Amino acid sequence: MAYTVDGVEVGPIALGMAGKNSLFSFIPPGASVSRLTPRDGSLSTDDAIAVLKAALDAGVNYWDGSDAYGSDSYNSLVLLNRYFERHPEDAGRAVVNIKGCCKIGAGAGAVAAAIDCSPGAVRACVDECLRQLGGRCRLHHFEVARRDPGVAIEDTAAAMAALAGEGKIGAPGLSEVGAATVRRALAAGCRVEVVEVELSVFSTEPLTNGVARVCAENGITLLAYAPLGHGLLTTKRFEDLPEEGDWRRMLPRFHPDNLPANRALAEAVERLAARKGCTPVQLAINWPRALSRRPGMPRIIPVVGTTSAARVADNARLVDLTDEDLDEMDRILAAHPVKGDRYHPGGMKVLDQLTTTILGLKPCDGDEARQRRYTRTRISLTPRDSSCQSRLEPPRRVPRACWSMGVPEPATAPAAEETVRPWRRRCAAAVLALAGATAILVILLLVGFVRGRGQEPWHIDTSSARVDLGYATYVGTRLLDSNVDQYLGIPYAAPPVGNLRWRAPVDPEGKGDVVEAHEDEDCLYANVWAPSNATPGSKLPVWLFIQGGGYTSLSNANWNGSEVVARSGGNIVMAEFNYRVGLWGFLAGDKVRGDGDLNAGLLDQRMMLAWVQKHISKFGGDPARVVIHGASAGAGSAVMHLTAYGGRDDHLFAGAIGESVFFPAQPYLPELEWQFDRVVELVGCRGRQDRDVMSCLRETDTETLQAANVAQPFPGTDGDVVPKFYWTPCIDGDMLEDLPYRMLEKGRFVQVPIIFGNDQDEGTIFAADASDEQAFRSFMQGNFPSLTGADADAILARYPREDAVPGHAAYFPSLARAYGEAAFTCPGIHVLASYYNHSGSLTAAATTPGHSSNTTTSNKTSDHQKQQPPIWSYRYNVRDSVYTSQGLGVVHLSDAAAVFGPDNVPSPGAAPPGYYTYNAGIVPLVMDYYVSFVRALDPNAHRHADAPEWERWGGDRGGGGGGGRRVLLETNSSRMETAPREQLDRRGQASPAQPHET
């Protein structure tokens, strides 16, 4: 029976607009996400239109695209607009299916997928799709590209059903979902028209996991993408795959250990194709189509991509496969089982069919829709309650399996004690921040590189992990495969809501309850990992991680410390936490100072440091042996704790690590009155008296405040350039007495052993794709508003145009280097040089575990070797073809995958797949350096057997600041090097993040 959509008969084969061998979810930031709409211009629009025209002429009239295939300005929708502008007569001949609500983005050093299937996001996505189509064709089908694990599928389905009822889309669809998800969407009243899944001779799972069955039972068309197995059918040798930029090198089925067995299956298909008088490709395309004839099977349409108009007709050839042919294929598949999973372990663990949970801390974000993506309980605001107390929606909306944080919920609560779950005290408005350009939720299936946080029930135990903090007893999770106890979502301060908005945090309310600490929470909450055999008398060193996110958002909720604790042999305790960011953490002005506290986000961090001093011993940690470790803005925060209160030593930590330290354009308080006034104006609090203004802000609902939690160009800069980092800590004259640069230059910092270092190409994921000198100047001045035109010209002269890199405009390389050095590299070198130049009388005892004789000094010493606190530095240059092929190099926070392990750093920081193959060797080497520093305040004490001895920064060559000795971290080639003289000199020149004398 013919399949028609809006009166158009659909052909038996569909065109995939992603193109040959292109899986958009494995392509890095800046990459050519689709070969029909590539960012690098490798296929012209004319050639792409020729493919579409050839497809239509060949009867391939179902076109499967996505708003993520390409860039926002040139994707499948834009190409369709251009096609139908040129061929308006074809608008009634093609059926358009678009996948949306999932975008590939640039995290801090990672491939990342931002997915949002909340009702508002679905509607906004469809509206944008229609805008880009420009009314030239109908949006017949719309799929959510992946299921959002934090949004009930019923809500997503209802939104799509409403859009279909309004005529904005013809019918809804789903992509890469399990049978249960399809049934739930149908039960919610959504008429699902299509379900798109990977189906080929190498991936037959939909035929047996219930997806095909539920589609057949409900008249749903099954779209079979990747019928050629991403090229596995025609790949004869692993060596035949391009070395640069081919993500298939990372897929298990292409691995040299698996490919020979899979080639045997391909060769059997080749033999059958020869007997049928067709090519193996044609047989593989027609096999799923022919399965539609079998009882219990749905209509199956294979989706095939190509970038060649000449090849369209070959792919569209129909091959008549008889029942005997299908039986022969069954025998072939039985005789040649596929070797290797579709994706890496991380991807497999978060397939929709498994309903695995992956989330940890919540993002401290005021966007309620975004909150829901981080929580397994559904939080809604109570409009009449100004303190924004939350309520739990009926649990039928979200399956019980989706509630737990990181591990399945235990079957029983602790006996004889009332268990109070943390979410019953949750406050939806607490600590919240703008989800900025770099804040994107990683959906691990899309990248396929990261292990899910979920543990199978036989890998956990909740009977023994328990800690009494005085204000509550917390029951954690014992990870039996690593002998680590995991506590997720422990409050370290009271929710900063209502009258506590923009005030210093206060202790959490004590109720003496027993709480299951394995669920996600609103701020202010911490996660702790400790050896299962640790006791209060263990006195283990403590690794306290401060995540980044540019002070505008938090980088991710899912940093996980279980692997580093296990790697240490049970010799450390690790903790991490969230804190207020964006407007919620860094709103500044005289009125805030008068009726509140400035830099609330930093005060949250300080509160966590105090909490560690008070409570970490109960997990087995030693409060006298705490090492703070910050990444990006977290590293910048670490510097501010080193210099806090004039460098006063409150004995909160014994060492510090700065990973890609970030110094933004940090203003003094008077320079931020315009920002405060803008928020007051936007939320309707203008005209109040001073204290009334703050009361008004505290009484304003979260949604209204979040609407004001957005960036705009800094005053006096190019109005077209919105700064990357709009909210930052301000110089408040108290905790932050002066700019970090000045405090370091004066030697006003706590002297402890430190490690500070950078990635090779810090700026590539932040810099604009500048095409000329003016774009270069505008970007720098837009992000560093103190720069004058002459300053911008001087920077341009210092960073002239460099050689072109793939996929980017002419001035991108030099702008990326300039911004990267200004914001990250030079600040790190400045910290190292300042520590070297202002060495105190740190004795050997200060570097011995168990001692914390930290000192503060402003006196430069002459005997660096004897009196200098130990200083180490690194340059991380582990190159991955996924990034280098796109001109991005070794991106910001690439090293996080090696520090924590590639399974433990979801976006930003999610590891590219090379960390599971050719770059795997760097992980234990780097991790052991870090663990060694935490254990002994020396990265060499417990370093990996293959690691070089890490020399200290010193070795003065006469220029001040030390000789710049650092370890170069490279795969199979790590060694010591000396920082280039010109780079050391540049840190002493005027930097956009430094104060400018006038």
Image (cartoon, helix red, strand yellow):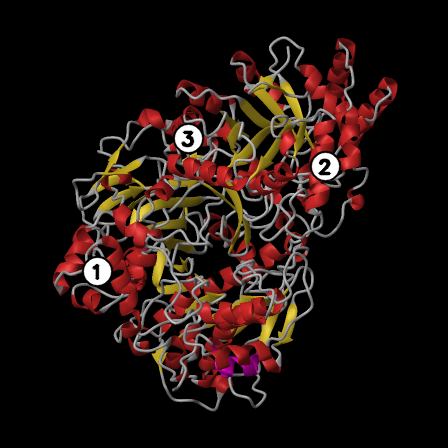
Let me know if residue 616 appears in the view: yes
**In this view, the mark in front (1 or 3):** 3
Q: Quadrant of residue 514?
A: top left
Residue 879 image offset from top left, x and y in percent:
65, 59
Q: Amino acid at mark 3?
A: Thr
Relative horizontal placement of residue 610, taking residue 1 as reference (left or right): left
* Mark 2 neighbour density, 10 Å: few (under 14) some (14–19) many (20 or more): many
Expressed as whole percent of the image width and height from the top left, the position of residue 747 reads: 38, 83
| Residue indicated by mark 2 | 51
Label 1 and label 2: CA atoms lie apart by 60 Å
Whether 988 is among the magenta residues is yes
Instruction: Say above or below: 676 vs 123.
Output: below
Report whether 446 appears left or right of 690.
Answer: right
- Which dot marks residue 334? none
Q: Which residues are magenta?
A: 983-991
| Residue closer to the observer: 581 or 306 | 306
- Secondary structure of residue under mark 2: helix
Q: Name the image quarter holding the N terminus.
A: top right
CB atoms at circles 2 and 3 under 8 Å apart?
no
Q: In the picture shown, does residue 697 fall above or below 390?
A: below
Which numbered disc covers residue 156?
3
Disc 1 to disc 3, C-alpha distance:
37 Å
Residue at horizontal 75%, vertical 12%?
Answer: 327
